[in-house]
Image (spheres, grey):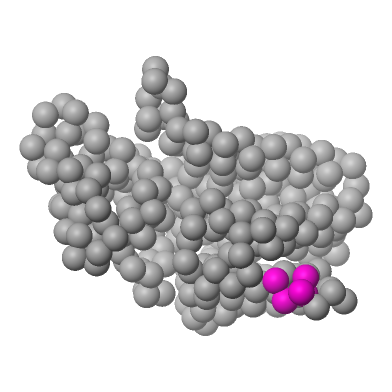
């Protein structure tokens, strides 16, 4: 781990943490040292929220209902918030910034419809997952519809934005493909997993930062900096999720949801490595993980066994290390409130409790 913890970055101000609308957000939780910046970004996030709702509105009753499902369920809105923060490195008032923020969140929402079908997830953001309400086919088609809506918005932002969006979409699909197939026999499972996280999560978060800097009028050097930053923030975000799956979270999500759905996480992969190396406690935990987890008692036993291993703290440390790498990537930028806010954003991502 880096000698300097991301907790030493600027404190989170302006709200109750990262969660946004719906589901207990209590404000946008805009990080940074400046109350003025927090007020500006919070006001623009409200406009992004309006833009999102307008973008999913449809005259077709079914499409309108299915498309609104996850928008109205709320969420952290990490990606559009990052667009607005990165834009503060330049001109955050540019109207294209709000459109770009809506694009990245629509893209993210579209992937969630598809992910929930592939994972057979029962809940999303505290609400029944779309496929539980309308079935797999409708959920998949709704995800496709949101990709189409995002494409229409990004087309108005110009060919460079379209090219970036297409490259990001390619990485999202490749990440999901590689996660679905799993590592090759001669591939390190942990390295494979971290690459999946980079593609599935890091790519869109990096694009969010890039769109903010790009439409805020920043030069190429700044754009390159925020892309490197966003890639590391994305991996930190997902590694923090891995830890939260074992601890439960403040939103009431049951601990062990990923374990029950047999989603590979870093603590599980590290435990398997330790078991293969002869660690008896890790081997016992892996035996529980590979057994039936349908019952709550079996799941709780597996969670407790895995939580007791060093792999959980190693995963937490890696999340914080990635967040610190993101903060370090910002070093070439001038010391401004916007840079401080982005540093605090990375720290909040790694240390969040939901």
Seen in the image, is 286 located left or right of residue 32? Answer: left
Indicate the position of residue 232 as horizontal and vertical percent values.
Answer: 51, 42
Q: Quadrant of the N terminus?
A: top left
Q: Is residue 197 above or below residue 342?
A: above
Q: Which residue is depicted at the point 32% across and 50% down?
A: 316
Indicate the position of residue 210 as horizontal and vertical percent values.
Answer: 71, 46
Q: Main secondary structure of the magenta part?
A: helix
The segment highlighted magenta reads 62-66
Q: Quadrant of the C terminus?
A: bottom left
Indicate the position of residue 230 as horizontal and vertical percent values.
Answer: 58, 46
The answer to whether residue 228 is seen in the rendering is: no
Residue 103, by quadrant, is bottom right
Q: Which residue is depicted at the point 15% across and 40% down?
A: 282
Seen in the image, is 71 located left or right of residue 279? Answer: right
Q: Is residue 79 above or below residue 203?
A: below
The answer to whether residue 65 is seen in the rendering is: yes
Seen in the image, is 75 located left or right of residue 349? Answer: right
Indicate the position of residue 213 as horizontal and vertical percent values.
Answer: 73, 50
Residue 97, by quadrant, is bottom right
Seen in the image, is 92 located left or right of residue 71? Answer: right
> Closer to the camera, 61 or 347?
61
Q: Which residue is depicted at the point 20% across and 60% down?
A: 298
Q: Which residue is depicted at the point 70% across and 71% down?
A: 66
Q: Is residue 244 above or below residue 71?
A: above
């Amino acid at each position: 781990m880096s000698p300097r913890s991301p907790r030493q970055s600027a404190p989170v101000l302006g709200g109750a943490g990262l969660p946004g609308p719906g589901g207990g957000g209590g404000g946008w939780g805009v990080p940074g040292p400046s109350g003025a910046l927090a007020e500006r970004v919070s006001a623009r996030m409200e406009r992004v929220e309006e833009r999102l709702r307008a973008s999913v509105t449809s005259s077709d009753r079914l499409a309108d209902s299915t498309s609104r499902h996850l928008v109205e369920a709320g969420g952290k809105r990490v990606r559009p918030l990052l667009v607005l923060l990165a834009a503060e490195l330049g001109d955050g008032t540019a109207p294209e910034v709000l459109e770009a923020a809506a694009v990245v969140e629509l893209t993210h929402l579209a992937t969630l419809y598809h992910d929930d079908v592939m994972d057979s997830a029962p809940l999303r953001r505290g609400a029944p997952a779309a496929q539980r309400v309308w079935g797999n086919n409708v959920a998949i088609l709704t995800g496709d519809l949101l990709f189409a809506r995002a494409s229409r918005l990004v087309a108005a932002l110009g060919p460079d934005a379209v090219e970036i969006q297409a490259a990001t979409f390619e990485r999202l699909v490749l990440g999901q493909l590689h996660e679905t197939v799993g590592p090759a026999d001669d591939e390190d499972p942990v390295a494979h997993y971290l690459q999946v996280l980079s593609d599935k999560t890091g790519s869109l978060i990096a694009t969010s930062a890039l769109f903010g800097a790009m439409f805020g009028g920043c030069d190429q050097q700044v754009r390159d900096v925020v892309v490197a930053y966003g890639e590391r923030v994305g991996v930190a975000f997902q590694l923090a999720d891995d830890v939260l799956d074992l601890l439960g979270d403040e939103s009431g999500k049951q601990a062990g949801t990923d374990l029950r759905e047999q989603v590979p996480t870093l603590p599980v992969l590290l435990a398997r490595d330790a078991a293969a190396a002869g660690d008896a406690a890790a081997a016992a935990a892996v035996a529980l993980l590979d057994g039936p987890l349908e019952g709550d008692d079996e799941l709780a036993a597996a969670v407790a066994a895995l939580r007791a291993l060093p792999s959980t703290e190693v995963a937490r440390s890696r999340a914080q290390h990635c967040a610190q790498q993101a903060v370090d990537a910002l070093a070439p930028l001038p010391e401004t409130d916007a840079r401080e806010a982005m540093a605090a954003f990375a720290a909040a991502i790694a240390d969040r409790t939901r």
